[in-house]
Amino acid sequence: MKDYILTVGLEIHAELNTETKMFCDSKNDTDEKRPNINICPVCMGYPGTLPVINKEAVRNVLRLGLSVGGEIADITLFDRKNYFYPDIPKGYQISQYKYPLVRGGSLLGVALTRIHLEEDTAKSIHPVKSLRDHGASDEDDYSLLDFNRAGVPLVELVTEPVIHDPETAGQFAREFQLLLTYLNIAHANMEKGEMRVEANISVSRSDLKSSDSKVGPLGTKVEVKNLNSFRSVERAIKYEFDRQVKLLESGGEVLQETRGWNEEKEETFSQRVKEESHDYRYFPDPDLPKLFIKDVPEFDKDKLQVSLPELPWQKRERYKKDFGLKGEDIEIYIREPEWGSLLEDAAALLKDRSLVQLASNYIASDLKIRIPAESFAEVIRMVSAGTISSRGAKDILKILETEGGEPKFIAKERKLIQQSNVEELKAIAKKVIEENAEAVTEYKKGKLVSLQFLVGQAMKKTKGSANPQVLKDIFTKIL
């Protein structure tokens, strides 16, 4: 029985959020619902029109390249990628082939091949297909084109074929989406089609040689296109691995082809024979000049480097080093900037590692706390000092969110301040001991959980206002 090795390389496209399109001044607006509004002769592909490079789109891709440690090109140029499809009326797409903007780099430990710019296509709409369940027939089939998306700047990232499991592929796509949003160069909303993933998948056999397991030549590459969710990325890769292994096990041959993903059936389906790069007949676009990166002041590496924000992996490391937070809590703050900002602002006020960790526990367990950082920090101080209980803190946080106010005043008004008067609590403890002789006997025999029971009974008598630690100390001393 032979082992099989899965090898995956990803191609990810993301629409950049520039004000205008890649080669014209038509508005770049993914929220526009009316068809064919943000268009002009250039993005409609009229003969005789001349494209002009969008400087901001190039700058954004260079910043992306620097963030992943890629090599920025000295010279770049745009090519014509020739193929015919209704959503690309010029008969070619302006892209980059031999001289991309960025080469190399890595993200989440995955080596990158290149990052380049191109223009997006128009959007094909198939009304009858969606109406087929309501009686529409194939004879009525037709398609419509919406050119609002045509010409939108599209960044494409290509990885090396170094991914060997579906989970890593999904994690990589998530991290890339996160990076795009941190750099503020793309919204990357997959549900709206602003980011699309394509997976190049192959399966090869691996024979054990001595103590080493070496991967043989890569298998036949199958491309699965337009995966529009991280779940789909992982499931499509797993499905293809299983499909190709079954083919090879039965003596069949894997065809090099492009396949689609059926979300409902959770399976891939054949679309067309896979093209090679020579099939597209790439050649430099004669209407666009070579772009000398060093000659453009806005593309200066030092300036671009300064423009980079704190990147996700840098923030993860800082949160771990400075605050000592758990990995799962850190991910909340990395992926939910609103809660990350609340923690950062509270940390600046608390200035104490243990208090920041306490604050993080409340944010992580009680998400959606929308209150001023000053009020939040004050509640954390009160909990730490034993002025209020953890339960009281949650009540105060809820009141602050819904009604506003000042934490100390709320605690006093709602009688949430913990009782710590030893003599008063000692009298309550003695009464509890009198009423619960059995629990007292069990505690004296070594059943420590009985002590917690006695503390709980005393808390009930004080309606939760007593300091549980003070009560525990009193019971211990009496017994």
Image (cartoon, rainbow, N blue to C red):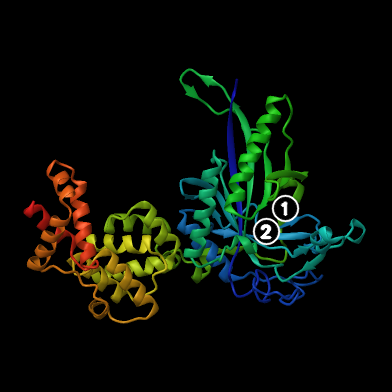
Task: Please tell me how crowded label 2 is: few (under 14), some (14-19), or many (20+) other residues with Cα within 10 Å.
Answer: many
Q: State the residue position of label 1.
A: 282
Q: Position of residue 407 (x, y in %)?
A: 27, 77
Contact flag, marks 2 and 1 (Cβ < 8 Å): yes
- Out of 225 and 112, give the one closest to the viewer: 225
> Residue 252: image x %, image y %?
74, 27
Q: Is residue 204 visible?
A: yes
Identify the residue under disc 2.
95
Which is more N-terminal, label 1 or label 2? 2
Residue 157 lies, in percent from the top left, at 58, 54
Relative to the observer, which residue lies in front, 216 or 188? 188
Q: Helix or strand or loop: what does disc 1 sit on?
A: loop
| Secondary structure beneath label 2 | strand
Indicate whether 164 appears above or below 102. Answer: above
The amino acid marked with disc number 1 is Tyr
**Which mark's residue is nearer the viewer, 2 or 1?**
2
